[in-house]
Image (tube, rainbow, N blue to C red):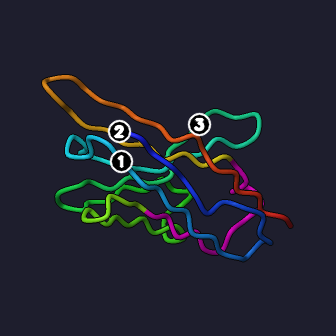
């Protein structure tokens, strides 16, 4: 599975950005997709995840209520609508896909897209 993110950039505090992730390859194996971020000098952390079948979502406190996650299974895409952005949201945002194939756990990552929020 290959994941390609898009939509990052520079935005002022209070603004919005929409991140997109396009999956290709053996997408039938994907069970959950999600967004993670790595702020400067910090470890990578969860932002939100969404399951393939039911569309169940899970949010970290940082994004709850501000960053709705969505997925289009027909197009194999996932999006993160980032609203009311804060300077502390500045990070590299990564798309993630997890699943199982032939009894093997799968874990794929995109290359990341930079989001910078200015104060």
Q: Which corner quadrant of the image does residue 111 belong to?
A: top right
Identify the residue under disc 3.
44
| Distance of label 3 from label 2 (alpha carbons) | 21 Å
Q: Position of residue 49 (x, y in %)?
A: 38, 52
Q: Is residue 112 above or below residue 18?
A: above
**Residue 82 inside the magenta-drawn segment:** yes
Q: Residue at x 73, y 76 (%)?
A: 14
Question: Could you say which quadrant of the image residue 57 lies in?
Answer: bottom left
Mark 3 packing: few (<14 Cα in 10 Å), some, or many (20+)? some
Residue under numbered circle 1: 24
Q: Which residue is nearer to you in this view: 59 or 21?
A: 21
Quarter that holds the N terminus: top left
Real-space Cα distance between discs 2 and 1? 6 Å
Q: Magenta span covers which residues?
A: 79-91
Disc 2 to disc 1: CB gap under 8 Å: yes
Q: In the displayed structure, would residue 63 be above or below residue 47? A: below
Using the image as rendered, state which of residue 16 and residue 106 is in the foreground.
Answer: 106
Question: Which residue of the protein is positioned furthest toward the left in this rendering?
Answer: 102
Q: Residues within 10 Å of mark 1 (few under 14, many from 20)?
A: few
Q: Residue furthest front?
A: 25
Residue 83 lies left or right of residue 34; in this view the side is: right
N-term-proximal mark, 1 vs 3 = 1
Position above or below: 32 against 72: above
Q: Identify the residue position indicated by label 2 in the image.
A: 1
Foreground mark, 3 or 2, reads: 2
Where residue 8 sits: x, y (%)? 66, 60
Q: Secondary structure at mark 1?
A: strand
- Residue furthest right in the image: 119
């Amino acid at each position: 599975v290959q994941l390609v993110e898009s939509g990052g950039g520079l935005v002022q505090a209070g603004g919005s950005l929409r991140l997109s992730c396009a999956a290709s390859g053996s997408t039938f194996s994907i069970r959950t997709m999600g967004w993670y971020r790595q702020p400067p000098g910090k470890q990578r952390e969860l932002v939100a995840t969404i399951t393939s079948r039911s569309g169940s979502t899970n949010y970290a406190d940082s994004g709850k209520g501000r960053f709705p996650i969505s997925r289009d299974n027909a197009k194999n895409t996932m999006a993160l609508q980032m609203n009311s952005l804060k300077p502390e949201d500045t990070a590299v945002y990564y798309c993630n896909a997890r699943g199982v194939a032939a009894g093997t756990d799968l874990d794929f990552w995109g290359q990341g897209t930079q989001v910078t929020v200015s104060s």
